[in-house]
Image (cartoon, rainbow, N blue to C red):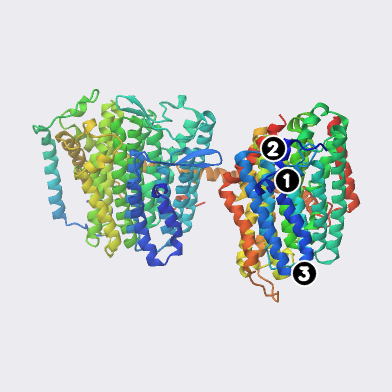
């Protein structure tokens, strides 16, 4: 590394605010081993929640800063890019950071400590350590501007989530975690191979720098191979059909609180990295004009929407139903990407946020149900409408949002997706979006029917409403799904700006 | 802050909250909300605008000007009077429907763009149908469905027109009139012949035409209004059609095609009114005829004609409401409004008789009653612009109005032959509502200046005086000789008796003709269908079963694959993505 | 007075005679009103015939007679039983 020039030395003396991009990642990273040291349940839990809220505060500050002043570039250790590691916060990842940390801030306090997790009380601190590491990994992936650094954080978050999933009950959770581990490792390896090929070609790992240095050699075989490895590797991470195989079991057998956290964040960050790779590293021109990615991504997205929704209809386990629904929803996001225009891409990006809220909220509802009835079978939810009215009302609202009823966030996403499809001249796709919403009507209705129109069977376990520690986080997410459905401009404006920025970089 | 509340919202929100209130509070609110709404609306300054945006589109929730103001005022008054009139009955369905319906109509009047107008246009359709269904009979249910289809259809045409217009111009704003000079106004969508009209103009024209009950599109009105509840018909009579007149006036003023349409509207319904037995249906035909005058006024489109339309709508809502109230009171007490079953009620219902007669005088445009100071403006405007045939038809219709609304309604209900029915006078709240309406009918006829001050154009500048000798004398001649004709016809025994009957109107097409055709087609299809059904079902069911099996737990797509298969999928995808670069 | 009806006339025939007599009287007055010095008919091109003496009187009378007679004839065409639409 070069010796710092006087100019760069100046940069090193910065205020605390300037360090926010790295603090965001460092705080949960340091808090995780602290958990192991402290061991005390209440203390550990309080710290985890505190960390989550601190991260939220930081990410909101960052987003505001980016919206007002533009991109923040932070050189770790004072070594400037492309030699050092750069943390680069633009509109897109500022937005992702807010989503991830907000979900963490809401989900972490859910329930009292290990309640409902069936954890050995003596190991609660390990649970929180893993949770914080996972958060650290996700935030790091989003914050860093260095491709290899992304891989490192990807592995941190993945390893943490394997162990979190393995916390679920029974051997099946272990098996699910194991197969996720195998698939995740394949995905991670593919990603690493892709980065390696790019490094070999360009000699840099910095994302922005990669883009510039790739332009002269953009059509070469090596670059195309790198592209394929990167996209497929990420496809596994974000559970893009048909690479989604790990997801249903993982979400089904993980503790519901973990499912809520992972469903709302992990695949979203995967989607974010995909956007980075497609638009920032390779650029829209290469992706859509040279490679014509939409020829492959569009059928995959449509297949995801329909297979996911149809499979959701057929499920008997509510967590598995939501998991398959997630696969369909990821299909909506990649569908937006495949359109390659501002409205479609904005639809995908806004759906990232919207789906995080509604699916997070719905999984929390399921967590409440599992805690009370001890079962995630749809049939065992019979008659809960009267027993747990507030929780079930949250399910109704979340379900309506999944369908895409106006005044919910689901409608906003579909509005932009349909708009993008029409703009692209893909009328049949617009029709298919609406058609797949009908499938969502069916799988949501199936559950609602059981909840409200079926009597609670004789001799069933007596159940009551859950307490405020669970209701409040649930309703924050569900309420947000309505709030941002009504005030759509708050999120859609960021998404539109982001989409313009992403499409602009490649042109 | 208070300016941020759109007019009509108080009634809509208040109406929706009503079911949560206890009975007594509901009754108080029913009357207080329209009054509060009026107080709020009145203080909004002219030129007040309230904009909002949905997604990326800028829309205008409220735009106040003199035309929207006068319709807003009379809609509030109508809601207030109807609320009083329905106080004796505690039916939350009607209370909610009445308030939200009137609130929707008021909000529609102040809409500054076509999309906002469409939203409230449909809102009036959906809320008002409950006033028909509130009769809670099989018959009213079917009528309500027919009504709903027509009303929603009108909204769909409006939306379609708005979309087409938006594609052409990139705007959905409702534009003000163009002043062509010589006191002639022209609305944004005005056209003179169907040949020159664009698609958007036509779509919106027919959307308004349905609600304004243009000839051949009119029959929902006579079908629905007699089937609503006692109070429901009074609610209905005030808003829907006048909202359409308002919309026509704003966007189609000066359209020549409206003049023959309006003239036809004044004339043909009165033939039906003469032979109709159900007195509320007579009033529905008569309402149709009154709308004709307003449509002619809109079509002429001069300042005097537009003032005439606005003032006639104002006066008309009051006296037509009063007449429906009177017949409603008769229905409420006697259990029927069939002319053939009534008669001689004046002894038992003296106040109702007097109030109804005031309404009859007002609709007939007797001097000193409200119809006189408004209708003559439209006739004069027609004469000024030398629409000679139209003028003669309007004059004929004026005589006819007196004949069926002025004479027939009170005569067969309250006089004629004693029906032998023993009934009580109408409840106090009905009498109060009718009393206020009757007082307004007379008050406007005498002290017309406050009404004229509300009109869109300055009346002083138009040199218009309602009461000059020529106007009064000729109008009296027309009316009195019509009365003489009634006496003459009765004496000769030529007057058609009131008979229990149904008179076939345009609705025959869809209630009988199309139904018969549909039934016959259905039978034919049924035969063909059954032969193919089993085959068809067999195949379709097979596909559904297969999809189900594949996606169910245990099926290839409903269950995660083994890790090996998943890894192979990843490899295949890798190859596919690599292929992208080579193809 | 008319050929329909079930009970006796609700207004005594003598009173009806007085009312009708009064009606004829004011009918005559209304026509004579055209002779008032303040009677200035409004002139409209093409509508001169409207201002001929007693025009509104006979026009109103004839209109109503024709209206009722035409409507009575129309019944032959359009009148059906009360339950016409309810039958299948």
Question: Are discs 2 and 1 located on one and the same chain?
Answer: yes
Q: Which residue is mark 2?
A: A428
Q: What residue appears at the point 56 percent right and 49 percent down from the top-left corner?
A: A486
Query: Of callouts 2 and 3, which one flags the residue occurring earlier in the amino acid sequence?
Result: 3
Instruction: Mark 2 vs mark 1: give the one in front.
Output: 1
Number of residues whose C-alpha sits closer than 10 Å to that of mark 3, classed few (under 14), some (14–19) or many (20 or more):
few
Dot label at residue A143: 1
Viewer can see residue A115: no
Residue B448 position in % (x across, y down): 22, 42
Q: Do the residues indicated by labels 2 and 3 lie within the same chain of the protein? A: yes
Chain for numbered disc 1: A
The nearer-to-camera label among 2 and 3 is 3
Nearest to the observer: residue B231 or residue A204: A204
The location of residue B416, given as percent across then percent down, is 24, 54
Tag 1, which secondary structure?
helix
Q: Is residue B161 left or right of residue A411?
A: left
Judge if badges 1 and 3 mark residues of a common chain: yes
Q: Is residue A450 left or right of residue B305?
A: right
Instruction: Tell which residue pokes out farthest to the bottom in this image.
Output: A459
Instruction: Point out residue A37 in the picture as x, y percentages from the top left corner.
Output: 79, 65
SS at mark 3? Answer: loop
- Compute the Cα span from label 2 to label 3: 48 Å
Task: State the separation of the CA atoms marked 2 and 1.
Answer: 37 Å
């Amino acid at each position: 590394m070069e010796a710092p020039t006087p100019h760069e030395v100046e940069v090193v003396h910065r205020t605390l605010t300037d360090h926010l991009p790295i603090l965001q990642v460092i705080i949960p990273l340091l808090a995780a081993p602290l958990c192991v040291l402290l061991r005390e349940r209440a203390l550990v839990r309080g710290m985890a929640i505190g960390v989550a809220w601190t991260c939220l505060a930081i990410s909101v500050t960052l987003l505001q800063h980016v919206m007002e002043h533009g991109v923040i570039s932070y050189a770790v250790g004072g070594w400037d890019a492309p030699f050092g590691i750069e943390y680069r916060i633009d509109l897109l990842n500022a937005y992702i950071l807010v989503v991830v940390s907000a979900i963490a801030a809401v989900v972490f306090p859910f329930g009292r400590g290990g309640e409902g997790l069936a954890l050995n009380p003596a190991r609660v601190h390990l649970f929180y350590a893993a949770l914080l590491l996972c958060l650290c990994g996700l935030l790091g992936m989003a914050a860093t501007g260095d491709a290899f650094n992304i891989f490192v954080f990807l592995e941190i978050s993945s390893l943490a989530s394997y162990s979190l999933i393995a916390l679920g009950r029974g051997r099946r959770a272990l098996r699910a975690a194991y197969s996720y581990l195998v698939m995740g490792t394949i995905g991670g390896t593919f990603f690493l191979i892709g980065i390696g090929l790019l490094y070999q070609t360009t000699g840099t790992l910095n994302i922005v720098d990669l883009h510039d240095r790739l332009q002269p050699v953009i059509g070469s075989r090596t670059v195309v191979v790198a592209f394929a490895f990167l996209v497929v590797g990420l496809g596994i991470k974000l559970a893009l059909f048909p690479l989604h195989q790990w997801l249903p079991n993982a979400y089904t057998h993980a503790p519901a609180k973990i499912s809520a956290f992972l469903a709302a964040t992990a695949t979203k960050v995967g989607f974010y990295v995909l956007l980075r790779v497609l638009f920032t590293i390779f650029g829209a021109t290469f992706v859509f004009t040279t490679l014509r990615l939409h020829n492959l991504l569009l059928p995959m997205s449509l297949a995801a929407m329909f297979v996911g929704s149809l499979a959701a209809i057929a499920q008997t386990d509510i967590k598995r139903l939501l998991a398959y629904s997630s696969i369909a929803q990821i299909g909506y996001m990649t569908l937006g990407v495949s359109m390659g225009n501002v409205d479609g891409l904005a639809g995908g990006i806004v759906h990232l946020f919207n789906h995080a809220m509604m699916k997070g909220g719905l999984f929390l509802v399921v967590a409440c149900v599992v805690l009370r009835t001890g079962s995630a079978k749809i049939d065992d939810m019979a008659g809960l409408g009267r027993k747990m009215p507030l929780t079930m009302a949250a399910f109704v609202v979340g379900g309506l949002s999944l369908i895409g009823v106006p005044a919910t966030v689901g409608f906003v996403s579909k509005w932009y997706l349909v708009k993008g499809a029409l703009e692209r001249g893909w009328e049949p796709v617009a029709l298919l979006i609406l058609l797949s919403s009908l499938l969502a009507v069916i799988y949501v209705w199936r559950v609602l029917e059981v909840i409200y129109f079926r009597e609670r069977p004789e001799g069933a376990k007596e159940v009551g409403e859950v307490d405020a520690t669970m209701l409040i986080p649930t309703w924050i997410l569900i309420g947000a799904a309505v709030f941002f459905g009504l005030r759509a401009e708050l999120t859609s404006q960021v998404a539109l700006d982001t989409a313009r920025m992403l499409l602009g970089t490649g042109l | 802050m208070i300016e941020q509340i759109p007019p009509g919202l108080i009634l809509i929100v208040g109406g929706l909250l009503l079911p949560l209130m206890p009975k007594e509070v509901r009754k108080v609110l029913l009357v207080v909300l329209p009054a509060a709404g009026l107080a709020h609306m009145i203080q909004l300054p002219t030129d007040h605008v309230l904009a909002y945006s949905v997604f990326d589109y800028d829309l205008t929730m409220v735009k106040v000007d003199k035309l929207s103001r006068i319709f807003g005022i009379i809609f509030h008054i109508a809601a207030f009077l109807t609320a009083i009139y329905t106080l004796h009955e505690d039916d939350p369905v009607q209370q909610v429907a009445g308030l939200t319906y009137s609130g929707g109509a008021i909000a529609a009047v102040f809409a500054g763009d076509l999309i906002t107008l469409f939203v409230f246009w449909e809102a009036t359709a959906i809320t008002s149908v409950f006033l028909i269904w509130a009769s809670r009979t099989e018959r009213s249910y079917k009528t309500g469905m027919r009504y709903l289809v027509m009303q929603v259809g009108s909204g769909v045409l409006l939306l379609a027109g708005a979309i087409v217009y938006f594609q052409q111009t990139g705007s959905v704003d409702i534009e003000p009139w163009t002043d062509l000079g010589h006191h002639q106004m022209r609305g944004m969508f005005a056209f003179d012949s169907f040949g020159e009209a664009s698609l958007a103009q036509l779509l919106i024209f027919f959307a308004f035409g349905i609600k304004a009950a243009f000839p051949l599109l009119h029959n929902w009105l006579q079908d629905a209004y007699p089937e609503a509840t006692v109070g429901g018909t009074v609610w209905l009579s005030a808003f829907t059609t006048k909202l359409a007149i308002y919309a026509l006036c704003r966007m189609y003023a000066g359209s020549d095609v409206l003049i023959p349409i309006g003239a036809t509207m004044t004339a043909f319904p009165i033939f039906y009114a003469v032979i109709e037995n159900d007195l509320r249906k007579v009033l529905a035909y008569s309402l149709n005829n009154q709308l004709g005058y307003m449509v002619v006024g809109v079509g002429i489109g001069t300042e005097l004609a537009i003032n005439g339309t606005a003032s006639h709508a104002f006066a008309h809502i009051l006296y037509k409401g009063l007449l429906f109230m009177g017949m409603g009171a008769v229905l409420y007490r006697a259990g029927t409004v069939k002319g053939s079953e009534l008669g001689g009620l004046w002894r038992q219902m003296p106040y109702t008789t007097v109030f109804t007669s005031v309404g009859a005088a007002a609709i007939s445009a007797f001097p000193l009653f409200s119809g006189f100071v408004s209708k003559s403006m439209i006739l004069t405007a027609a004469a000024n612009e030398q629409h000679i045939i139209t003028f003669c038809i309007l004059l004929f219709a004026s005589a006819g109005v007196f004949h069926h609304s002025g004479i027939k309604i009170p005569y067969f209900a309250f006089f004629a032959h004693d029906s032998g029915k023993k009934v009580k006078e109408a409840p106090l709240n009905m009498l109060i509502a009718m009393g206020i309406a009757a007082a307004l009918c007379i008050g406007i006829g005498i002290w017309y200046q406050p009404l004229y001050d509300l009109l869109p154009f300055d009346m002083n500048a138009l040199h218009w005086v309602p009461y000059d000798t020529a106007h009064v004398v000729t109008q009296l001649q027309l009316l009195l000789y019509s009365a003489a004709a009634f006496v003459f016809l009765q004496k000769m025994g030529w007057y058609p008796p009131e008979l229990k009957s149904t008179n076939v109107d345009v609705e025959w097409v869809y209630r009988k003709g199309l139904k018969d055709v549909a039934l016959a087609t259905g039978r034919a299809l049924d035969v063909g269908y059954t032969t193919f059904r089993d085959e068809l079902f067999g195949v379709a069911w097979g596909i559904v079963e297969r999809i189900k099996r594949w996606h169910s737990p245990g099926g290839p797509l409903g269950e995660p694959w083994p890790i090996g298969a998943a890894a192979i999928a990843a490899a295949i995808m890798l190859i596919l993505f690599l292929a992208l670069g080579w193809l | 007075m008319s050929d329909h009806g079930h009970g006796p006339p609700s207004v005594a025939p003598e009173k009806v005679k007085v009312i009708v007599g009064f009606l004829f009287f004011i009918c005559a007055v209304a026509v004579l009103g055209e002779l008032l010095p303040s009677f200035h008919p409004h002139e409209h091109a093409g509508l001169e015939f409207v201002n001929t003496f007693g025009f509104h009187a006979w026009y109103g009378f004839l209109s109503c007679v024709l209206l009722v007679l035409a409507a009575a004839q129309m019944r032959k065409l359009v009148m059906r039983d009360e339950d016409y639409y309810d039958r299948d």
